[in-house]
Image (cartoon, rainbow, N blue to C red):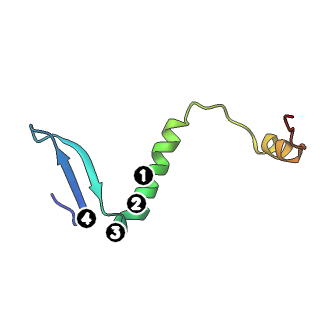
Amino acid sequence: MTFEGIKFIVDDKGKKTAVIIDLEKYGELWEDIYDYIICLERENEPRETLEEVKAKLRKPAEVDA
């Protein structure tokens, strides 16, 4: 199966190892894929509630001298 604007890089055994995506054609799809990858990487990071974030934003910034 082939798609216009998508090319696969294969190793010497024919195994797909990378992909080249035409961002003019599939830029929005790539953004979705990239966002998903970022979500997976941040999956185990500590969470903050909206209220905690609001409280931090209201607090005056501390400046190191």
Quadrant position of the N terminus in the picture: bottom left
Name the residue at 40% across, 63% down.
Answer: 27
- Amino acid carrying label 1: it is Ile
Q: Is residue 56 left or right of residue 48?
A: right
Secondary structure of residue under mark 2: helix
Circles 3 and 2: CB distance less than 8 Å?
no
Residue labelled with disc 2: 29
The residue at the point 49 percent across, 38 percent down is 40
Image mark for residue 57:
none
Question: Which residue was labeled with disc 1?
Answer: 33
Q: Quadrant of the C terminus?
A: top right
Q: Is the C-beta separation of discs 4 and 3 under 8 Å?
A: yes
Task: Estimate how packed mark 3 is, as few (under 14), some (14 to 19) or many (20 or more) residues with alpha carbons within 10 Å.
Answer: few
Residue marked by disc 4: 5
Q: Residues within 10 Å of mark 1 (few under 14, many from 20)?
A: few
Mark 4 to mark 1 CA distance (whole Å): 16 Å
- What is the distance, in whole Å, between disc 3 and disc 2 at their CAs? 9 Å
Picture quadrant where residue 24 is located: bottom left
The spot of residue 18 in percent (x, y) is: 26, 45
In this view, the mark in front (4 or 1): 4
Judged by depth in the image, the label closer to the viewer, 3 or 2, is 3
Query: Helix or strand or loop: what does disc 1 sit on?
Result: helix
Name the kind of residue labelled 2 in the image.
Answer: Leu
- Relative vertical location of residue 19 with respect to residue 40 in this rendering, above or below: below
- Residue 25 is tagged as 3
Compare marks 4 and 2 and give the one earlier in the sequence.
4
